[in-house]
Image: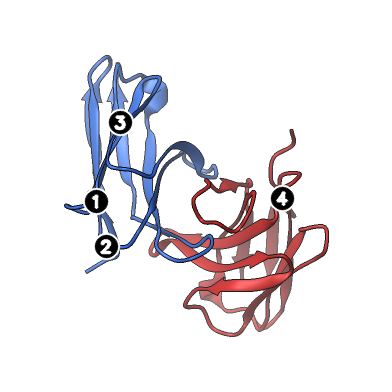
Amino acid sequence: QKEVEQNSGPLSVPEGAIASLNCTYSDRVSQSFFWYRQYSGKSPELIMSIYSNGDKEDGRFTAQLNKASQYVSLLIRDSQPSDSATYLCAVNMAAGNKLTFGGGTRVLVKP
Amino acid sequence: KAGVTQTPRYLIKTRGQQVTLSCSPISGHRSVSWYQQTPGQGLQFLFEYFSETQRNKGNFPGRFSGRQFSNSRSEMNVSTLELGDSALYLCASSPDGAGNQPQHFGDGTRLSIL
C-alpha cells in the first residue's frame, strides 16, 4: 500500500462545474497536509495547506481534512480551463520537512 | 520577494560522470529539501537540510549527497551517474524546520543522462 494515494484520473469536468479530488494517507500521526498544482513541464505550485479537521476555503478552492478517516480532499469550484493540471496531495509524515506525495490526479476542464 | 532559484535549469551528462546542482532558498528560509521527479516514480524525497545539517533522508543510494551552507544555499551532488538518474530535480524551501509550514518549489533542474 502506498503511503499517499490519489486517483490518477484524468478527471474530466465541464467548465463552471466543481472538481472533487481525493487523497488518503497511511500514517495516522501526520499533522500537515498540502495540495500542489503542477502544470505540464513546470514545478509544483502550492495551492492550499491544512492542519486541522474540517474545511478550509481560499477563493475557489476548499480543502477538507478528516484525520480519523485519514482522508484529505480538494474541491475546485467554478472550474476554469486554466485549472487543467495535475494536482498533487502531499503529507508531512516526519519531524522536519519531508513531504510524501501521492501520484497526482490529472484534471481536465473542458470549455 | 524572489522565489527559490535553482541552477542550472538543464543538464546533459553521460553515465559515470558526476553532477552538482545548486539551490538558493527564498530569503529568510532556513530549510531546504530536495526531491526527484520521474514519470514512473513520481515525486520522491531525497533529503532535507536545516542549519547546515541533514535532518531527513529518503531512500536513495549514497551516490546522492548534499550540503547546506551558512547562508542556507544548498547543493546536491550525484556521483557515478546512471541512466535512471534522468529526472527533474526540485528544491523546496520553508522558513524553518517545524514541518508545519508549506514548502515552496523552485523551477527545477532537468537532468538527462546519455
Indicate the quadrant where residue B67 lies: bottom right
Label annotation for residue A28: 2
Residue on which disc 1 sits: A67
Residue on which disc 4 sits: B25
Instruction: Report the side of B82 relative to A54 (left or right).
Output: right
Q: CA distance from mark 4 to mark 3?
A: 32 Å
Which element is circle 4 on? loop
User: Chain A, which colour?
Assistant: blue
Q: Chain of mark 2?
A: A
Question: Horizontal and vertical percent for residue B106?
Answer: 63, 47
Residue at 57 percent of width and 79 percent of height: B82
Which element is circle 2 on? loop
Residue on which disc 3 sits: A108
Dot 1 amino acid type: Lys
Q: Which of the two labelled residues, at mark 3 and mark 2, occupies the earlier sequence position?
A: 2
Q: Nearer the viewer, mark 4 or mark 3?
A: 4
Residue at 24 percent of width and 51 percent of height: A67
